[in-house]
Image (tube, rainbow, N blue to C red):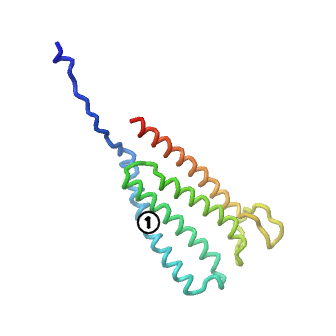
Amino acid sequence: TMDDLQFRTNTKPEKKREYLRRIQVPLSLAILLSGFLSIGGVVILAEGIAAQVWESDRFVTFCYNLLFCLIAFCAFLSLIKIIVDEKPFSRTLTVSMNLIAVLTLLASFLFPRIPGYVSSGFEILRLSADFILLDGKIFLTGLFLLILSRLIGTGFEMQKEMEEIL
């Protein structure tokens, strides 16, 4: 009969949030700590400007700390966006990862030019005791982050395509 062949179709899309449940604890901890570190970065910047840290031997340490705080701020924004959108990939995450990679690559070039810089032990193109083209550890980290940012960008594009199909 015709009644036996009838069925209902639910066309409401279900949000897949399982990945959020799997990373809930580390995600919450990362948001909390990166938020605190972002606020700390403002304090570090203000104290450095007030103390004119660029004229002291602590300037290299100040730059490392400021770089880490900028990275934490980018990560904080990305993590908040993941929670708000309930999607693993977003344009914000892609842009933030690219920014983190570029900041790190820039630091690998700029930090060796700061007076008081101490080599990490892995240098790329050392021409003299006074000239190092790149700090290799920072540069390699930047390359890894650049690759990761490209992978995240690809994931974002694939997610957009999948949403368009559905």
Q: Position of residue 71 (x, y in %)?
A: 53, 64
Q: Residue sitting at 60 percent across and 58 percent down?
A: 101
Give the total number of marks visible in the rendering. 1
Image quarter where the C terminus lies is top left
Q: Which residue is mark 1?
A: 33
Quarter of the image where one finds residue 58: bottom right
Q: Residue sitting at 59 percent across and 55 percent down?
A: 145
Side of 86 where 66 appears, left or right? right
Q: Looking at this view, name the residue that lies furthest to the bottom.
A: 51
- Image height check: is 52 above or below 151? below
Side of 131 where 161 appears, left or right? left
Q: Position of residue 84 (x, y in %)?
A: 36, 55
Quarter of the image where one finds residue 11: top left
Query: Given the image, on which type of amino acid does mark 1 rest?
Result: Leu
Side of 155 where 165 appears, left or right? left
- Disc 1 crowd rating (10 Å Cα; few below 14, some 14-19, many 20+) is some
Name the element at disc 1.
helix
Q: Looking at this view, name the residue that lies furthest to the right.
A: 128
Side of 149 where 111 appears, left or right? right
Q: Residue sitting at 43 percent across and 57 percent down?
A: 79
- Image height check: is 90 above or below 68? above
Residue situated in front as seen by the camera: 26 or 74: 74
Q: Position of residue 95 (x, y in %)?
A: 53, 56
Q: Position of residue 113 (x, y in %)?
A: 72, 72
Image quarter where the N terminus lies is top left
Q: Looking at this view, name the residue that lies furthest to the top.
A: 1
Residue situated in front as seen by the camera: 41 or 2: 2
- Image height check: is 45 above or below 36? below
